[in-house]
Every structure is written in C-alpha cells, then in structure tokens.
Amino acid sequence: MEKKTNETNTQVESAFPKGEKIASENFTGEVWVHMMGANDSTLHTRFGNVTFAPKARTNWHSHAGGQLLLITKGRGYYQAKGQPAQPLKKGDVVEIPRNVIHWHGAAPDSEFAHLAFSLNLDDGGVVWLGPVTDEEYGRIDK
C-alpha cells in the first residue's frame, strides 16, 4: 500500500508482518519478531521477520548450522568478530558460515528489517554471547 504525499510516494507496509515486540537479553533496543514456517520443519530451518528500531541490534552470537539474512527494509550492519562492520540495505543478502561469531542490527538513524534463516538446526541452534557494547557499535562507520 502506498501513501501519497505532495512530493513523494512512500511504502508504508512490509510484505511481512512486523510481529510482536520482544523483551530479550539477547538484543539491545526495540526489536519485533514474526516467526514463520512450521516449528517441526523437515527442512531443519527456522525463519522469521526481524525488525529493529534505530540503533537496535543483536548480541554477539553464532549458529552451528549457519545463518542467512535477506534484507527487506532500511539500513543496518553485519559484523563478524574481528572484522569491520559491513553496511546493509534493502535487497542485500548475507551468508553467515557455521559457528562464525557475529551481530546484526539497525543503523543509528534507520529502522531495519530482515528475514533471518537459522540453517541446519539438526547441528545445533544459536549460541548467544554478550552484548555489542555502545563503544563497539559506535565504531561501525569507522
């Protein structure tokens, strides 16, 4: 659905539901999650739409089976431990290998959404680690 203004057309709805606001120690800031697909997937995969308010982000974490992110809205970042943060925008795809410690989340001035696929769940689930500190987050554009 498009909303018309005097100067521009803007997208006001996503193709995927924003979901429920979550309260979790594994995230910093406001985050909404809408899980999709069957819980008992024969594909050994869980996936959902994750929406981050500006500055919101995951903790450092890894996935035994790897992870795939499909960026659907806004601007954000992905960072593997020991590497520089990579800017992300709508249409980008991030393939995260098995057991790579990383975080992802919104840019300071943009809401950000992605479809997140946790892969090969028969090899293990997500391993949550500590928060991305404000100091670490403050270095994303440097």
Image (cartoon, rainbow, N blue to C red):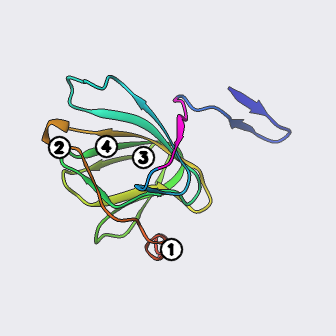
* 48 to 53, vertically: above or below: above
Instruction: Tell me what residue is drawn at x 23 percent, y 38 percent.
Output: 119
* Camera-side mark, 3 or 2: 2
* 41 to 125, vertically: above or below: above
Secondary structure beneath label 3 = loop
- Residue 44's image quarter? top left
Furthest-right residue in this view: 6
22 magenta-colored: yes
Q: Earlier in the sequence, mark 1 or mark 2?
A: 2
Crowd rating for badge 2 (residues with CA inside 10 Å; few <14, some 14–19, many 20+): some
Secondary structure beneath label 4 = strand
- Between the residue at mark 4 and the residue at mark 2, the CA separation in whole angstroms equals 15 Å
Mark 2: amino acid: Gly
Give the residue at mark 2: 124
Q: Which segment is the magenta one?
A: 16-23
Residue 52, x across and y down, in percent:
53, 49
123 magenta-colored: no
Give the residue at mark 4: 68
